[in-house]
Image (cartoon, coloured by chain):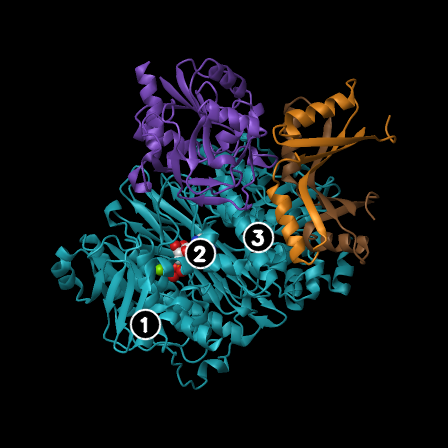
Chain colours: A purple, B cyan, C orange, D brown
């Protein structure tokens, strides 16, 4: 039972994710290089970490989505396995069309790094089952392009299928419908701008993020 | 660019344009035994510039203490190294990028960050934090706002992209920085196994490798340019700006760290290409080891066509490193760097003599003794004279505190005091998930993973104090940094510095430099914090107006247990509040003087290093004994501001009664701390420190009573004003 | 050899924060007669001739990489350079 | 009413990491015949007529705001819309 952390050229939250998995969740993380064409067979969940990929000079995530490993991640997702994209990972998953919509530059155009209050809108997903419905939680944000966009039809679909998992309590970036995190229609692929791995230890200011990972691990154990 | 013949260079005095004096040019001739050619003249001009050779500042830097029991590496390498136990060491250095930032703030600041990061990983250390020190003109000017906005964006974007948290810094706003802003960056790294790297190229036949980005005509003469004053005319004729590529740097960094950690057996030396690019890195590596080298310039990766040797050698293109690799291991290096999508090219070999020989198109284009280039630069002790302003009789400023609450509210909104949140929220301060104390407290704290230790770090300088008294001001700069470290639970380990001053040719400026470094040295001895690295930036003048003497001090402290980590904010209602340290009527050079008079003047107040050290010692002991809930050092704005700042974070009010006149609330007497203590620890704390109880925490109000005044402000209201002031003034 | 210019902008219905910011800045510079601004990306590509149709190639580059078709639209101009065979 | 298009790119000698990144990505997508890419900015402005010359105005917008003349160069196209007086 391995948890794959994907590394793209220039990834920088890869170790942060690795440490949380190994030291806080006590599961087995494994780095998977973007040049690989297959995920190791004993991988039970894929995490696309935050930070940057290829410098994100064109559009965040635009180039990473062509990495060789992405094909297998798509198959892995299509088979119903959990895939979590955080920050740049969210951007990559939208660019790869594993999630609807896209992420624009923050409305005020500035990079923003701060502690962020969120509401849990759907606590029934693979990624949120350890939260109470409507619960207010804190996870830091740190992004320049976190302004989620989707058209009205898509937004309606997101609502109909209960795909909006996290919303901002005070919208920091101009995101449509205060969206901070969504899942795909099947509920097994999640993308979110806040960093749960930065809220997984008390000394770093909170553990709400840890519960997000615990949700995934709990589901795995139930299988 | 036309390559003049040696005779023409001599006749037309081209060397003067490049910053070499008549006497220096004569010395070059003497060393070579002939006239230098075009390329060689360029090499000497760059290597003998103030920026590379420290020819004006060397004698002053000698005053600094640079050794100590934990100091593994002092000045002289990419960065200094201090042992922190358990086989680990902390590595840090500061750099200025003032001139590039003034010209092109975004890229200037970004490449400043990129450069200082390379200094850290060239030592084999993984960069764990960035800090900055920014000095700009007043915020009533649109160009200044643009400069600040772009500088902050440049610092943030580079650090954010490469994945190094920017965790602290400082900012001042003064007229003198209007035409010559300062951007200083500091990088801190962690060395996990104490095997340090040297920037040396030894062993005849060993290979010189160029790794990283291609060379273009960026920032040619940057080092020379950084050693000249600015004026309006020059604005238009600046060489091409350098553009930062943090993605490229991330790849180069990971590759270099991999090489150092996993292939140490084939690596002889490593150095970054900073100021004066290829020539300074290669010549320094050779000279340090006592070896010469042959470099084939045809092999240097080039971004632009038809570059002449002068351009190739002096370009300051970013994200490049130079390696010396044991012969026979070229393939291993090339393959390793390819793994990181980075180019590694063998461009030369080490010679067994000391000749530094450049080849292009099968011709020798330069042939000089490497020691002449690196070690023979002249050193000057300039004339110095004490500026008259320092001896002007002063009556002593008395603030008007008849409306004391208003004064406090106004002070809280002065840009130097107001919250810097609107700046630091643009920096990713949390990447690497080690930031235990985020920006906004006295020092930032980064834990050392897998240990119970943490590192506290801060950058400080109060240029106003230095302007009124460069000697005491220099002492205070170091003391203030130490105070911030101690308030955060740390033990000061050592400092790095950036000496930002005007032109050393001006005897009064040279005096400032002399006195400031003297004061800093004395303070470093007092706190046992040697100077382990640093940087000098002179000629910071605009249209003849010099900046204030601005020696930025970057200090790192060791927090021996996570239990000692302390922040400035009050933690709970009902705690006792103490003032450690004595308060006097010290108003010259203060924030309130500037606010009420529009300028600073007079004699700077007294400062005593021994008192400072004693008070810091008390705080350290109280923290270690577990007696305190918060500690905040007193700085700009004095006591009232420090009390207010302590209430903001958790919005816990306070009720304070002081036996002093209202004006003293704003005195900036040094060596003081505000401490909050749980009531059950009252006796223990008082016995240890003898400090004066001045009030209790609780409620929603900021209530401060003196002999002749009362402040009663709503904490939330005061906080809002303080928090939003800077963003408002930037609009 | 071709010289290709590609223009990428947000779709009309999408708020373009950068364009808005530029507009505000122009107004502050007293260019109050500026009604609307959109900011987009502009690429210049130099492409050598192959047996494949250049239009098809550029179309593919646009949809696969240069544009996020969820939010952005593109147009391009292809110019054949005659100096070369 | 005018429709103005402004193109801003880095000067030739300036490193263009964005263009490089796009070029590498296109190569990875097997468009290996792409020789060079520069990435710049593109602005579309809608400007109402005033008594001032439109060229002068646009020129000023370019040098004062849209371009960083230290490193970038610009060009523009002005089109007068006839629908309006
Ligand atoms: N330019 C900056 N970048 C990042 N953090 C900053 C900057 N300026 C100030 N800060 C942070 O704001 C807080 C207050 O700064 P300052 O007033 O200089 O503190 P002090 O007087 O205690 O040194 C500190 O945590 C500092 O690190
Ligand atoms: Mg402080």
Q: Secondary structure at mark 3?
A: helix
Q: Residues within 10 Å of mark 3 (few under 14, many from 20)?
A: many
Chain containing mark 1: B
Residue A68 in the image: above or below residue C20: above
State the residue in front, B356 or A132: A132
Q: Residue at x 37, y 75 (%)?
A: B403
Instruction: Read off the chain for label 3.
Output: B
Q: Which residue is mark 3?
A: B150
Taking the image as shown, residue B53 lies to the left or right of residue B526, namely right
Mark in the foreground, 1 or 3: 1
User: In this rendering, do the residues under marks 1 and 3 share a single chain?
Assistant: yes
- Residue A30 seen in render: yes
Left or right of C69? Residue B288 is left
Ligand 1 closer than 8 Å to label 2 CB:
yes
* Sequence-first tag of 2 and 3: 3
Question: Do the residues bearing badges 1 and 3 touch, measured as CB atoms within 8 Å?
Answer: no
- Chain under label 2? B
Q: Quadrant of ligand 1?
A: bottom left
Q: Residue at x 40, y 39 (%)?
A: B432
Count of number-bearing discs: 3
Q: Position of residue B550 (x, y in %)?
A: 48, 65
Q: Pointer 1: what residue?
A: B665
Q: From mark 1 to mark 3, how far is it between C-alphas? A: 36 Å
**Circle 2 residues within 10 Å: few <14, some 14–19, many ≥20:** many
Q: Are marks 2 and 3 in contact (CB under 8 Å)?
A: no
Quadrant of the rendered image containing residue A116: top left
In terms of image quadrants, where is residue A30?
Answer: top left
- Horizontal side of residue A73 vs B189, given as left or right: right
Disc marking residue B420: 2
Q: With C28 as the anchor, is A47 left or right in this view?
A: left
């Amino acid at each position: 039972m391995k948890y794959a952390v994907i590394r793209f050229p220039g990834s920088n939250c890869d170790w942060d994710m690795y440490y949380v998995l190994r030291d806080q969740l006590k599961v087995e993380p494994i780095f998977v290089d973007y040049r690989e064409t297959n995920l190791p067979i004993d991988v039970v969940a894929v995490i696309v970490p935050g930070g940057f990929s290829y410098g994100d000079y064109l559009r965040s995530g635009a180039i990473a989505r062509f990495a060789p490993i992405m094909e297998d991640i798509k198959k892995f997702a299509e088979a119903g396995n959990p895939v979590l994209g955080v920050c740049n990972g969210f951007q990559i998953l939208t660019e790869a069309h594993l999630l609807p919509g896209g992420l624009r530059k923050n409305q005020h155009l500035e990079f923003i790094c701060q502690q962020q209050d969120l509401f849990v809108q759907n606590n029934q997903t693979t990624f949120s089952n350890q939260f109470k419905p409507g619960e207010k939680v804190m996870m830091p944000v740190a992004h320049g392009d976190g302004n989620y966009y989707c058209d009205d039809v898509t937004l309606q679909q997101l609502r109909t299928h209960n795909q909006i998992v996290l919303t901002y309590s005070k919208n920091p970036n101009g995101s449509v419908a205060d969206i901070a995190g969504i899942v795909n229609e099947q509920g097994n692929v999640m993308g979110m701008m806040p960093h749960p791995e930065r809220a997984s230890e008390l000394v770093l200011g909170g553990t709400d993020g840890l519960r997000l990972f615990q949700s995934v691990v709990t589901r795995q154990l139930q299988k | 660019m036309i390559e003049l013949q040696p005779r023409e260079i001599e006749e037309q005095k081209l060397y003067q344009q490049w910053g070499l004096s008549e006497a220096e040019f004569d010395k070059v001739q003497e060393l070579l035994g002939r006239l230098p050619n075009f390329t060689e003249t360029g090499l000497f001009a760059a290597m003998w510039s103030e920026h590379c050779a420290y020819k004006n500042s060397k004698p002053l830097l000698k005053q600094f203490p640079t050794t100590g029991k934990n100091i593994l590496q002092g000045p002289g390498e990419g960065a200094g190294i201090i042992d922190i136990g358990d086989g680990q060491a902390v590595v840090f250095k500061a750099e200025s990028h003032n001139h590039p930032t003034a010209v092109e703030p975004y890229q200037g600041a970004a490449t400043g960050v990129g450069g200082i990061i390379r200094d850290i990983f060239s030592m084999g250390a993984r960069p764990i934090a960035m800090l900055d020190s920014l000095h700009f003109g007043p915020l009533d000017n649109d160009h200044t706002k643009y400069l600040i906005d772009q500088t902050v964006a440049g610092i943030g974007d580079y650090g954010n992209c490469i994945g190094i948290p920017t965790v602290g810094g400082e900012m001042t706003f003064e007229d003198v920085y209007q035409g010559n802003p300062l951007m200083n960056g500091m990088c801190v790294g962690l060395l996990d196994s104490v095997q340090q790297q040297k920037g040396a190229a030894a062993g005849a036949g060993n290979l010189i490798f160029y790794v990283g980005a291609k060379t273009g005509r960026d920032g040619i003469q940057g080092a020379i340019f950084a050693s000249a004053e600015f004026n309006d005319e020059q604005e238009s004729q600046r060489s091409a700006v350098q553009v930062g590529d943090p993605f490229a740097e991330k790849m180069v960094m990971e590759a270099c760290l991999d090489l150092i950690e996993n292939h140490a057996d084939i690596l002889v030396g490593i150095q970054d290409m900073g100021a004066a690019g290829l020539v300074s890195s290669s010549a320094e590596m050779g000279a340090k080891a006592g070896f010469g080298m042959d470099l084939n310039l045809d092999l240097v990766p080039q971004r632009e066509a038809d570059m002449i040797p002068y351009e190739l050698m002096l370009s300051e293109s970013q994200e490049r490193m130079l390696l010396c690799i044991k012969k026979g291991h070229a393939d291993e290096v090339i393959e390793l760097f390819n793994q990181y999508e980075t180019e590694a090219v063998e461009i030369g070999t080490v010679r067994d003599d000391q000749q530094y020989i450049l080849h292009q198109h099968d011709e020798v284009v330069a042939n000089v003794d490497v020691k002449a280039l690196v070690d023979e630069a002249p050193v000057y002790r300039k004339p110095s004279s004490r500026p008259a302003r320092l001896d002007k009789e002063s009556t002593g400023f008395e603030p008007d505190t008849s409306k004391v609450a208003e004064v406090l509210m106004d002070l809280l909104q002065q840009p130097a005091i107001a919250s810097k949140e609107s700046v630091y929220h643009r920096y990713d301060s949390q990447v690497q998930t080690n930031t235990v104390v985020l920006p906004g407290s006295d020092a930032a704290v980064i834990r050392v993973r897998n240990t119970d230790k943490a590192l506290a770090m801060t950058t400080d300088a109060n240029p106003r104090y230095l302007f009124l008294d460069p000697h005491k001001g220099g002492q205070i700069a170091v003391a203030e940094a130490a105070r911030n470290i101690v308030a955060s639970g740390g033990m000061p380990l050592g400092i790095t510095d950036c000496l930002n001053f005007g032109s050393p040719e001006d005897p009064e400026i040279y005096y400032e430099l002399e006195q400031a470094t003297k004061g800093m040295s004395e303070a470093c001895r007092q706190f046992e914090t040697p100077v382990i690295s640093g940087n000098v930036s002179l000629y910071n003048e605009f249209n003849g107006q010099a900046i204030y003497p601005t020696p930025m001090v970057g200090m790192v402290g060791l927090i021996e247990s996570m239990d000692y980590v302390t922040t400035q904010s009050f933690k709970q209602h009902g705690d006792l509040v103490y003032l450690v340290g004595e308060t006097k009527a010290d108003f010259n050079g203060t924030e309130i003087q500037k606010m009420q008079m529009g300028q600073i003047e007079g004699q700077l107040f007294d400062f005593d290093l021994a008192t400072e050290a004693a008070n810091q010692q008390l705080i350290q002991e109280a923290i270690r004994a577990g007696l305190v809930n918060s500690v905040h050092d007193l700085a700009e704005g004095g006591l009232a501001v420090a009390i207010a700042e302590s209430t903001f974070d958790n919005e816990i009010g306070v009720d304070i009664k002081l036996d002093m006149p209202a004006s003293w609330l704003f005195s900036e007497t040094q060596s003081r701390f505000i401490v909050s203590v749980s009531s059950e620890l009252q006796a223990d704390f008082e016995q240890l420190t003898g400090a004066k109880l001045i009030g209790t925490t609780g409620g929603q109000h900021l209530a401060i009573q003196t002999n002749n005044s009362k402040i009663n402000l709503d904490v939330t209201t005061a906080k809002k004003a303080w928090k939003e002031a800077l963003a408002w003034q930037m609009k | 050899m071709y010289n290709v210019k590609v223009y990428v902008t947000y779709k009309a219905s999408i708020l373009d924060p950068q364009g808005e910011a530029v507009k505000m800045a122009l107004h502050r510079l007293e260019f109050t007669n500026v009604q609307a601004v959109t900011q987009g990306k502009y690429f210049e590509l130099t492409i050598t001739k192959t047996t494949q149709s250049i239009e098809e190639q550029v179309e593919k580059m646009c949809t696969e990489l240069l544009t996020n078709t969820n939010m952005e639209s593109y147009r391009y101009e292809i110019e054949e350079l005659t100096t070369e065979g």
